[in-house]
Image (cartoon, rainbow, N blue to C red):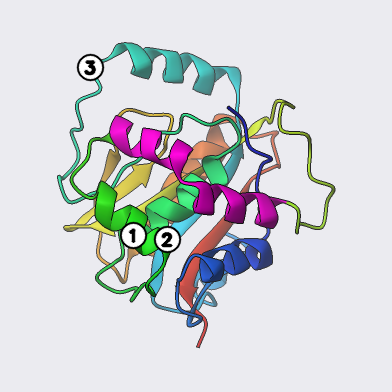
Amino acid sequence: MAWVPLESNPEVMTKFLHKLGVPKKWSVLDVYGLESDLLAIVPRPVLAVILLYPFSKIDKAEEDKAEVKDSKNDGSDSVYHLKQNISNACGTIALLHSVANNLDVIQLEDGFLKKFLDETKGLSYAERGERLEKSQEIIDTHMESAQEGQTEAPAEDMEVYHHFVAFVHKDGSLYELDGRKPAPINHGSTTPEALLDDAARVCKEYMERDPNEVRFTVVALAANE
């Protein structure tokens, strides 16, 4: 099963979240650089940071290794993590991870996303992924949003070489959430206030893996007012 990928475009991602019932006060905003002066201009509070990076052979090898490992979740039980079974769905899954782990702050409006998150709260990582494949309203909203980008949307079956991951604060730790990995990755301690700076540090590590690569994008789910 494959979806048309979502463009890494803050406007498209923001509209998508608002259609899912995220209140208008929250938007996806560009992070123009990872230096402290550029991070300082991002409005606060920041609830999540999303990195789009080129998917290299190294990642493929790591992913295959991760699949072999026992997929027991070694993150905090309170971290909402969802398996990506659908090709090209990583943008939507990064946004779902960003919202699902901030329900204490985001007052989700009644609707199909709230219902989906309520119904999948007690399920495993794999079961949540299976539910997403059957959630027609989320699929329809994704498809609608995937056609709204500035570049022409690629075909569903075309291989995409970029991948989205989300960074969130939960219970004093910084978690990286990737639907292709069997468990959240704990990157050490953080606070809601330090989330952007700490996530930026991990994003820099991704960039250092391939110093000649420029196709990285970082956005934040943050207050816009």
Q: How many marks?
A: 3
Check disc 1 and report its element: helix, strand or loop: helix
Residue at the spot of label 1:
115
In terms of image quadrants, where is residue 197?
Answer: bottom left
* Residue 17 falls left or right of residue 117: right
In terms of image quadrants, where is residue 22?
Answer: bottom left
**Mark 2 touches mark 1? (CB < 8 Å):** yes
For the residue carrying disc 1, how many other residues have a C-alpha within 10 Å: few (<14), some (14-19), or many (20+)?
few
Pick whichever of labels 1 and 3 is earlier in the sequence: 3
For the residue carrying disc 2, how many other residues have a C-alpha within 10 Å: few (<14), some (14-19), or many (20+)?
some
Check disc 2 and report its element: helix, strand or loop: helix
Of 37 and 154, nearer the camera is 154
Query: Which residue type carries mark 2?
Result: Phe
Of 38 and 154, nearer the camera is 154
Query: Which residue type carries mark 3?
Result: Asp
Q: Is residue 217 above or below residue 44?
A: above
| Residue 92 seen from this side | yes
Relative image position of residue 202 (x, y in whole percent): 42, 46
* Residue 121 falls left or right of residue 49: left
For the residue carrying disc 3, how many other residues have a C-alpha within 10 Å: few (<14), some (14-19), or many (20+)?
few
Magenta residues, dominant SS class: helix
Q: Which residues are magenta?
A: 126-146
| Residue 183 seen from this side | no
* Quadrant holding the N terminus: top right
* CA distance for labels 2 and 1: 5 Å
Residue at the spot of label 2:
112
